[in-house]
Amino acid sequence: MFHKLKQRWQVTSNLQFIRIFTVFALTGSSSAKLTGPLLKSFPAIAELDALSFNVLYILATFVLYQFLLLLIGWIFGESTFFIQFLKKFFFRKRK
């Protein structure tokens, strides 16, 4: 099952594959956990109605996720992989 994903991502070892999945897991959890307190620290944002706050929360989580993905990827020694991953994500050709 993971063999095709390893080929697609050009991952050379199981250890690298585990590090990449660990980075994805930590980044997702961290961005979701940090966004709320970060937004609530700004009084103007904290006073928004629920719908506006939730929309802003989703947008802020998406942006924070990108930064954390690079940071945590760098910490785990996989910065090259995640730079390429984000380039493909943002600049892929649309059909």
Image (spheres, rainbow, N blue to C red):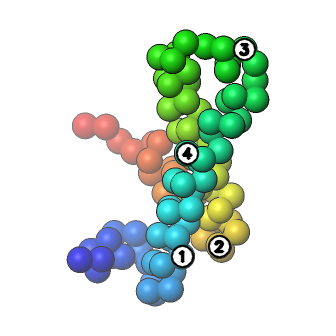
The amino acid marked with disc number 1 is Arg
Q: Is residue 87 above or below residue 95?
A: below
Disc 3 marks which residue? 44
Disc 4 marks which residue?
Answer: 32
Q: Which disc is residue 85 wearing?
A: none
Disc 2 marks a residue whose amino acid type is Phe
Q: Provide the residue designation for mark 2.
A: 76
Circle 2 SS class:
loop
3 or 2: tag closer to the N-terminus: 3
Q: Callout 1: helix, strand or loop?
A: helix
Above or below, comparing residue 90 to residue 49 in the picture: below
- Residues at marks 2 and 1 touching, judged by CB atoms closer than 8 Å: yes
- Are the residues tagged 2 and 4 within 8 Å (C-beta)? no
The numbered mark, 1 or 3, whose residue comes first in the sequence reads: 1
Q: Considering the numbered disc 4 on the image, is that residue within a helix, a strand or a loop?
A: helix
Kind of residue sitting beneath label 4: Ala
Q: Are marks 3 and 4 in contact (CB under 8 Å)?
A: no
The Cα atoms of the two marked residues, 2 and 1, are separated by: 7 Å
Task: Examine the image and state in which quarter residue 95 appears.
Answer: top left
Q: CA distance from mark 3 to mark 2?
A: 36 Å
Would you name the residue on which mark 1 appears? 19
- Disc 4 or disc 1, which is closer to the eye? 4
**Image quadrant occupied by the N terminus:** bottom left
Res. 84 visible in picture: no
Residue at 62%, 64% (x, y): give it.
Answer: 73
Crowd rating for badge 2 (residues with CA inside 10 Å; few <14, some 14–19, many 20+): some
Q: How many marks?
A: 4
Q: Residue 59 appears at what percent x and percent y?
A: 53, 30
Q: Earlier in the sequence, mark 2 or mark 1?
A: 1
Q: Are marks 1 and 3 in contact (CB under 8 Å)?
A: no
Residue 80 spot, x, y in % from top left: 60, 66
Q: Is 18 situated left or right of 36 in this image?
A: left
